[in-house]
Image: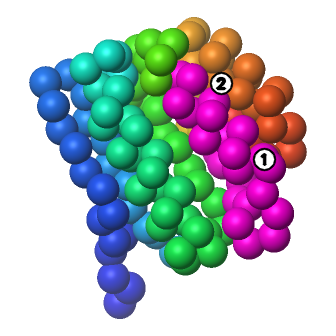
Amino acid sequence: MSAGPDLIHQVEIDHYAATCTVENGTIVVRMRGNADVVAKPHVVELLAQVDAHALAIKAKEAVVDVKELYFMNSTCLSLVMRWVSQLSERTGSQRFPVRFVTNKNLRWQQRSLSAISTLARGLVTID
């Protein structure tokens, strides 16, 4: 019997929640609600935790599930872009692919995340 995912980070405030777990060598991030100016410091902390743990375990991949993230403001989006940009500059085991799992009904996700995908071709995929 295998153990469940290891919880790395969890936050829940009025309108934003996120978790980060490790599942079989993959970092799994789930974000929901609205990532706005109030959520910004939590997004900063989340991305720092994701990056630190991914490097520590030499993650195979980071999966960022945003299916229930209904809004992300430009400030939080720029934090994600900066993180992906930093990843794209790394080599070897310090570089890991990022896969965004999206909600096709939330059109902002496709527009915004495809810009991030363009920034880091071959590193970012969007499902």
Q: Earlier in the sequence, mark 1 or mark 2?
A: 1
Provide residue 21's location: percent of width, then percent of height.
39, 61
Q: Nearer the viewer, residue 92 or 125?
A: 92
Q: Nearer the viewer, residue 126 or 105?
A: 126
Q: Residue at x 64, y 60 (%)?
A: 61
Provide residue 53's location: percent of width, then percent of height.
48, 67
Q: Quadrant of the C terminus?
A: top right
Circle 1 sits on which residue? 88
Three-letter residue code for mark 2: Leu
Provide residue 20's location: percent of width, then percent of height.
38, 54
Circle 2 sits on which residue? 113
Provide residue 38's location: percent of width, then percent of height.
25, 20
- The answer to if 92 sits in the magenta stretch is yes
**Above or below — where is 18 with respect to 81?**
below
**Above or below — where is 97 with respect to 80?**
below
- Give the quarter of the image for residue 33: top left
**Above or below — where is 6 with respect to 20?**
below
Q: Which residues are magenta?
A: 77-99
Three-letter residue code for mark 1: Ser
Disc 1 crowd, CA 10 A, few/some/many (<14, 14-19, 20+): some
Q: Residue furthest bottom?
A: 1
Q: Residue at x 53, y 57 (%)?
A: 51
Q: Quadrant of the N terminus?
A: bottom left
